[in-house]
Image (cartoon, rainbow, N blue to C red):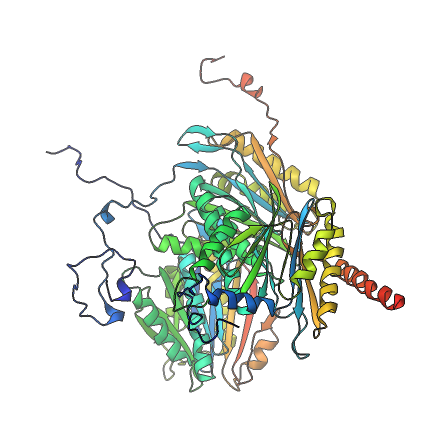
Amino acid sequence: MDHFPTNWGRPRNDAIDAYGTYPIHSRPKNDQDAFSAGVQRTQQPIVTGTSVLAIKYKDGIMMAADNLASYGSLARFKDVRRLHPVGDHTVIGAGGDMSDFQYLQTILDELTISEFTAQDGHSLGPAEIHEYLAQVMYARRSKMNPLWNSILVGGVKDGKKFLSYVDLLGTTYSASTLATGYGGHIAQPLLREAVEGREDTLTEEQALAIIENSMRVLFYRDARSLNKYQVATITAAGVSISESKHLETSWSFAEGIRGYGAQTQ
Amino acid sequence: MTSIGTGYDLSASTYSPDGRIFQVEYANKAVENSGTAIGLKVKDGIVLAVEKLVHSKLLVPGANRRIQTIDRHIGLATAGLLADGRHLSNRARDEAANYRETYNAPPPLKAVADRLGLYVQAYTLYSSVRPFGISTILGTVDEDGPGLFVVEPSGIFYGYNGAAVGKGKQLAKTELEKLDLSQLSLREAVIEAARIIYLVHEDTREKEFELEMSWIGPETNNTHLPVPQDLLEEAETKAKEQFEFEDDAA
Amino acid sequence: MPGMVSTSQPTQQSFNPYTENGGTILAIAGADFSVIAGDTRQSEGYSIQTRYAPKVFRLTDKAVLAVNGFAADGNMFVKKVRQRLEWYRHAHAKDMPIRAIARLIQTMLYARRFFPYYVYNILGGIEEDGTGAVYSFDPVGSYEREACRAAGAAQSLVQPFLDNQIYFKNQTPAPGTSFPKHLPLSTVLPLVIDSFTSATERHIEVGDGLEIYVVLAKGSTSLQGITSIRGVQELTATSEGERVFVIRRDLKKD
């Protein structure tokens, strides 16, 4: 029997302080085992999702992400859901490593259940979910073991719209239009042009048209994107995530391109 | 009581010569001193109801809840020592969360009841601890439909169609047996549960009480929630009518 | 052998826990006031992440902290400083004096000497003796009290300007006169605004919005001047005498 409570549940190591000569609070740690050198941490994403877009509009937040999870340049999974509801007022959308995203879904589910079981009349809104995620992401980057994602958090609670970003470094920011990954370069300028100053007047139809147009441009230009995507709306009435939609695209212009490739005239 | 003075009742780790563990039987006495709790398993849902005895007028209405939520789809009601009930509900939450973590699926109530049974039973083995002074009703609705269990201080647990624990359990069970539980709708079950609690309370002529009720079923999207205020009031009004009728007859 | 790849150690591209989010901050101390300002743009590389992410924070009625560098570290650092100030309030029933906050910030930064908060801090406010103060820090806690300091992306543009206009560097006083030790608020505020419009003009990471915090000492003569400024907002929470104001201005968004 080891009489030192600080050692309970830890691997035994008689090479370190076998006779318990240290005071309890400053005992040397013996939790390094023979395998600790072989422990690996996420240094790069493996199965990845690309952009997520989100905007504010009259009734709340609209968010979109396609259904693709890539394995490098291989379009590996084409029916992946990258928008995920959390509680009754929030949706999160993630780009980056999909296994890390699934892990985040799991801990957020745990969190919402423990809040639900308290039955104290409080529920987590988008601001709380975002703050929690930011703390998790920042804590993991500080352990040099990041969760490789960029995430948008959107929602409506108590009549207030909320839209914010958080990523693998724990960086956060909010704006009336947000886009992760490639969308940050391609879609964000389009979204800003269409939305800024009109956050409280855009109708759902107008918002949807803006989102659809941006998703189409992304599909044309982002090689890791898919023409199958979902749209989430979060309003005072609650959360709804659409079934997968297909983008209408047109490629006939390719016929008219001259000057390079096989056709020179 | 025959056990007193024999010395066989001083520890949960000591049998009496005829094979009983008196500490567990005393724990059952603690349950019998408590306000009644009942559970109804009906066609498409579960109703839990508790006769919460209010020992002081100074208490805030709604304080000291005896019905707890364990998981989205699981509710728990206790009769016995209030603090023991809170401890066991915390344990139940941990077990439910642990099941989710391991299997990434909502825990079936049988699994939670099983683990709680093991936990409660462990407190009947050692001289250094006291058995739980509570009987616990667990209710759920999952993909296999509604489920209802009772965990006793001995750690034993059974599945039921209708369950009653606490002071008025005999009368409550008699009333539950009269019902055609499998044909009752959830709303009808709420009315019946309120009626039974009021009936057993009237029988004991105890002090003031509050009716505490929760349900799981289609109305709640199969989550465990308190019965809404308007339905609760309707059920209480109907429950009180049964006595007015009796008074007229008498 | 040259050119041979070592097989004994797997090579890994290691994770970089830092980034640089642009922006600029500055602070100037007067005789009985202190001005702390920062732009509100947050960027990474050539992308603007948001046009409004505050970098200047009111800590107490006599202390304002500006943070610049890696935004995630900055926000976490402000959160931790505020937590410590709250604990101090619970223990001592008063706000921590600014010179103690400055030393606290040094301790907190140096505690992370080998995994630093990648943040430049400038603390501005009023000392217990009623004088305006500016403390500036490097990321690992080295600090000093100064009359003015600029930090961040456009430090190299703004600091020389401040040296010239506040410290009168490279200027010679007219014969028989000397330069003032402290400038009045009415001179300082335009200097701050000009610093930021100029930085916005010449640095791509600076712009969008400007937040200027002004902390006045008890009975400061600058009070009449500030209340007449367009769009000024008072943030004072206690009635101890010091007063905090914020002035918000637009900067060019290109």
On the image, the x and y values in percent for residue C15 come to 32, 47
Q: Residue at x 35, y 52 (%)?
A: C17
The residue sitting at the right extreme is: B248
Q: Up-down: is B208 above or below A201?
A: below
Q: How many marks?
A: 0
- For the residue pair B228 and A173, the one nearer the viewer reads as B228
On the image, the x and y values in percent for residue B164 come to 64, 58
From the image, which quarter does the N terminus of chain C lie in? top left
Residue A108 seen in this snapshot: no
Dividing the picture into quadrants, the one containing residue C164 is bottom left
Residue A89 seen in this snapshot: yes
Q: Up-down: is B124 above or below A171?
A: below
On the image, the x and y values in percent for residue A173 come to 50, 54
The residue sitting at the left extreme is: C1
- For the residue pair C214 and C161, the one nearer the viewer reads as C214
> Relative to A4, is A44 on the left or the right?
right
> Relative to C227, is C27 on the left or the right?
left
Q: Residue at x 53, y 34 (%)?
A: A67
Q: Up-down: is A219 above or below B55?
A: above
Dividing the picture into quadrants, the one containing residue A2 is bottom left
On the image, the x and y values in percent for residue C165 come to 41, 71
> Relative to A85, is A180 on the left or the right?
left
